[in-house]
Amino acid sequence: MKSVIIATKNKGKAKEFERLFSKYGMEVKTLIDFPDVPDIEETGETFEENAIIKAEAIAKLANSIVVADDSGLAIDALGGRPGVYSARYAGAEKNDEDNIDKVLSEMEAVNEEERTARFYCALAVAGPDFETITVNGTCEGMILNERRGSEGFGYDPIFYVPSEGKTMAEMSPKRKNELSHRAAAMKNLEPYIEKLSLM
Ligand SMILES: O=c1nc[nH]c2c1ncn2[C@H]1C[C@H](O)[C@@H](COP(=O)(O)OP(=O)(O)OP(=O)(O)O)O1
Ligand SMILES: [Mg+2]
């Protein structure tokens, strides 16, 4: 089976990519299996820049084609925060529960109709002999006042998708992978999957 390296240490993302790439008959390897690989500092100002930084750094180390995902939550009432700081919003140790608590407290006084938000996902593909490419995907939703559901990861329990009547943590993993920002970005990656003969 063909395989692809995803430059992530996030177990939630890894699980989703396993499913998303299995559609192309591809197996996913991540940095979770390579604990010695150092954390790549995400110094970019945009999701795209950070995805490129991660993909290129790991592609260089592995001398291989690498995909990286940089993603996060942009809340309108918070001026787009937590944005590129989503993972470290409540501190450097990257704690999903603390991040959610911080968002909930900042959103406490915000009216229902002003609780609009979207998830962003930038994917970068880097490799030894081509120019790095990037694609994007988004998913629109609303920030709830409390957690709902136990699937998924990150901000999923407070991210409500009106068309589904569910938070992302209440959806099946299969359904989330049909409508998420990551799914949308993967759809945009599709033409390149063949072109880069990742398959
Ligand atoms: O589908 C999602 N459902 C809920 N939350 C999500 C999702 N997608 C991204 N997020 C949040 C989690 C984290 O707070 C940040 C990603 O930060 P981001 O730097 O891209 O990932 P990370 O540091 O966890 O792992 P890595 O850089 O090794 O891929 O956005
Ligand atoms: Mg990160």
Image: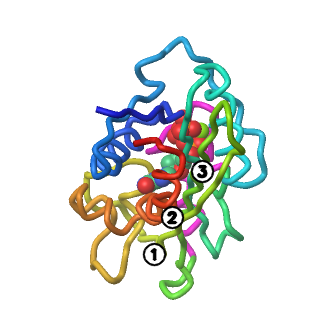
Q: Where, quadrant-wise, is the C terminus in this rendering?
A: top left
* Label 2, label 1: how far apart the Cα atoms are: 20 Å
Q: Pick out the residue farthest to the top.
A: 36
Mark 3: give few (<14), some (14-19) or many (20+) Cα within 10 Å: many
Q: Amino acid at mark 2?
A: Asn
Q: Amino acid at mark 3?
A: Ser
Marks 1 and 3, the one that precedes in the sequence: 3
Residue 66, horizontal then vertical, whole percent = 55, 35
Instruction: Give, as a single range, the part of the protein colored magenta.
Output: 85-109
Of residues 54 and 128, the one drawn nearer to the viewer in this rendering: 128
Work out whether 128 lies above or below 23. Answer: above
Q: Is residue 11 above or below residue 180?
A: above
Asked if marks 2 and 1 touch (Cβ < 8 Å), the reply is no
Q: Is the CB–ligand 1 distance for label 2 below 8 Å?
A: no
Circle 2 Cα neighbour tier, 10 Å, few/some/many (<14 / 14–19 / ≥20)? some
Foreground mark, 2 or 1? 2
Q: Is mark 3 within 8 Å of ligand 1?
A: yes
Residue named by callout 1? 141
User: Which residue type carries mark 1?
Assistant: Gly
In the shown orientation, is residue 167 left or right of residue 72? left
Q: Residue at x 51, y 64 (%)?
A: 188
* Front-lying residue, 199 or 74: 199
Residue 150 is labelled as none
The part of the image, by quadrant, that contains residue 1 is top left
Residue drawn at 25 percent across, 64 percent down: 175
Label 3: which residue?
A: 86
Q: Which mark is residue 188?
A: 2
Secondary structure mostly seen in the magenta stretch: helix
